[in-house]
Each structure stands twice: as structure tokens, then as C-alpha cells.
Image: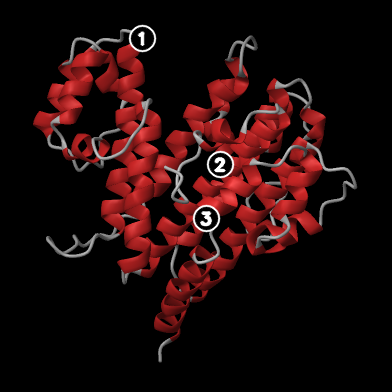
Amino acid sequence: MPIAITASNAVLAKARALYGKRLTQADYHTLAGCRSMTELADALRNYPLYADALEQSSSAVPRRAGIELDLRKSIFARYASLCRYEMSAGQEIYRYFILSCDMDEILTWLRYLDSGNPGQYLFVLPDFLDKHTGLDLYALARAKSIQDLLDVLQDTPYGAALAPLADADTEGSMLAKAEPLLMQMGHEALMRLIPKKAGVKGGQPGIRQYIERTCDIAALSQAARMKRIGMSPTAIRELLRLDCTDLTSREWDALLAAKDPQAFRVALDRTFYGKELARVESSYLQDGFQKIQYRWCCKWLRFSTDPTLTMLCYIFLAKNEVSNLNHIVEGVHYGMAAEEILSLLIGGDAS
């Protein structure tokens, strides 16, 4: 059997095996019921996907920041295990995941900068990804200012993307200023994954359908946010990336012409995304989009025969699970009631 086929079959099997170890509703209830960081860390060690990261923790008394760092380690470890198969198949998608890891590290450093503690940044890429990253993570860990960051990144694509930060106002969140620049870079990388040949209509979705949904959900979220702050249709259209969409031009025209957020939602309800949103309970549009994407990825991780789509779906679901755990960590830290914490979660039969 050719190496590429063997590796592709391994991706399918590995992604589904990892998905089989996901947290359940009962697991979330147990974790949300913890009353201290120590109790929460002990509970997380009972779950295979998090046990290694928690066991390697250097802190004898777990703290919120330490647990969040361990959760980042766990997701990168899964990236690495899946990327090994993609590399052996000769495919390029692993480059997208490495870029995603690099951007996560830069954004994490920026969060520490915004908090006034850039020196507390710790990189967590596992050895496999560390060997393939384009970043000097040790230099990034020593950076103390935006200029330091740009110096570290000057010979990388990230440096070019973030160059506007050199002239940015230092007041306010630098993360908020940098994130759109990196998201643009991520969008372009995602677009490069689209197969040159169109998929078969009416069959199983492929990579293009996943990317179209990802781009549409990002664009719809941005458009809704811009409507709330009163931006004009022309200004919104200039800022949105609509180069990969499953919505028609007429649907986008109706959305962008909406005079206010209420009219925007009416126009959205007429699209198939609106029909999907009607089947989930959500107080906020962003949460609704996360829920419908969660359901879509759950379905096609189980039933797709496309290894790359299966891998993309699994990574979305894994990141969603870590996001849920971060909500739990924050909730336990602030002494929130378990039911209040659980209301914030998406997936694991909790949504």
C-alpha cells in the first residue's frame, strides 16, 4: 500500500481515536463542581488527553495560570501527533497548523504584554513542532516590548504582517491591534488549502466546504459587530474578506444593506446559516455560530472519508474543548456556581 494512503488512513484513525477520548457532559459537571485549583488539577489528571500535561507541571500548588498553560500544552501535543501523519503523507496542511501554533504563541505573548508582564510568557510547543516553527521562541520569551517583538520577528512572515504595530498608538490593547493583522495572515493560509479541483456536488463535504464555513462565520461575526457600532455598508464591505463564501452575492447584499443589527439578523435568518442558528439555543450570535460549527464538525468527523477534513474537524473540536476548560478554570477561580459555569460551555452535550 502506498505511503500516502497508509498515512491518510492513519490520520482518520488517529483523529477519531482522539475524539473518542473527549470530555462528556458528566465530565464537565465533575470539573465545574471543583472548588479549588488543586481539586481541578487533580480531576483533570484523570482524563487521558490532559494527564501528561498536568503531570509535567512544575508547580506543587496549581494556580490558574499554570493550569491554563498545561491546557495549551495538551492542544499542541495533539497538533503534533496529527501533523506527523500529514507530513508522512507528503501533504502541506501541517504547515497551516504550525502557522496556527506560531500565531497562538505570538498572541499569548501579547496577552502577557497587555497585562504588564511580558517577562512571564512561557512557550509550550512540543519538540516536534518546535523543530518546524519559524519562530525563535527563546528570543520571544526574552522580549519586553513591541519593538522587541518586531526585532524577534523581523526575518519571518509574522514580522511583515505585524509591521504596522511599529507606528501604532501604544495606548490600549496591543493584542486588539495585532490580532486582525495575524487573522488576515491566517485567512490567506487557509485559502491556500483549497483544492484546485472542485468537489462533487451533492456528495460529502470536503476541505473547501469547511473553509467556506470558517470564512463565512468569521465574516458574518465581523459584519454583525460592525453593524452594532454603526458602520456603513460600504465601509463594512471594504473590510470583509468575501473571497471564499458559500453565501450568494444577493444574500451578502441584503446583509450589508441592513440598516441596523435587527435588520441584519432578519436577513441572516433567510440564509441557511440562519436556519442552522434557529436549531440551537444561544443568547449571543458568536456563541450560536460556535455551536453550529461544533455540530457540523462532530457530524463530519464521524462520517467523512476525507482525512484532511477529518483532521480539521478534530482540531476545531479539540480547541473548543480547551476553550470550555478555560471557562471552567476561570469559573472555579472566581467561585462561580457549577450550573453558571456549565451555561458557558459549548459541546460535550452541554450545549
Q: Position of residue 142 (x, y in %)?
A: 81, 36
Q: What residue type is labelled 3?
A: Thr
Q: Is residue 123 visible?
A: no
Which residue of the protein is positioned furthest toward the right in this rendering? Answer: 60
- Left/right placement of residue 203 relative to residue 168 reads left
Q: Residues within 10 Å of mark 2 (few under 14, many from 20)?
A: some
Judging by the rendered image, the residue that carries numbered circle 1 is 229
Judging by the rendered image, the residue that carries numbered circle 2 is 323
Q: Determine the CA span between mark 3 and mark 2.
A: 14 Å
Q: Identify the element where label 2 is drawn.
A: helix
Q: Identify the element where label 3 is drawn.
A: loop
- Which residue is at the front of the view, 74 or 148? 74
Q: Position of residue 196 (x, y in %)?
A: 25, 60
Q: Position of residue 48 (x, y in %)?
A: 66, 64
Q: For the point 41% across and 88% down, which residue is it?
A: 2
Q: Residues within 10 Å of mark 3 (few under 14, many from 20)?
A: few
Between disc 1 and disc 3, whose residue precedes?
3
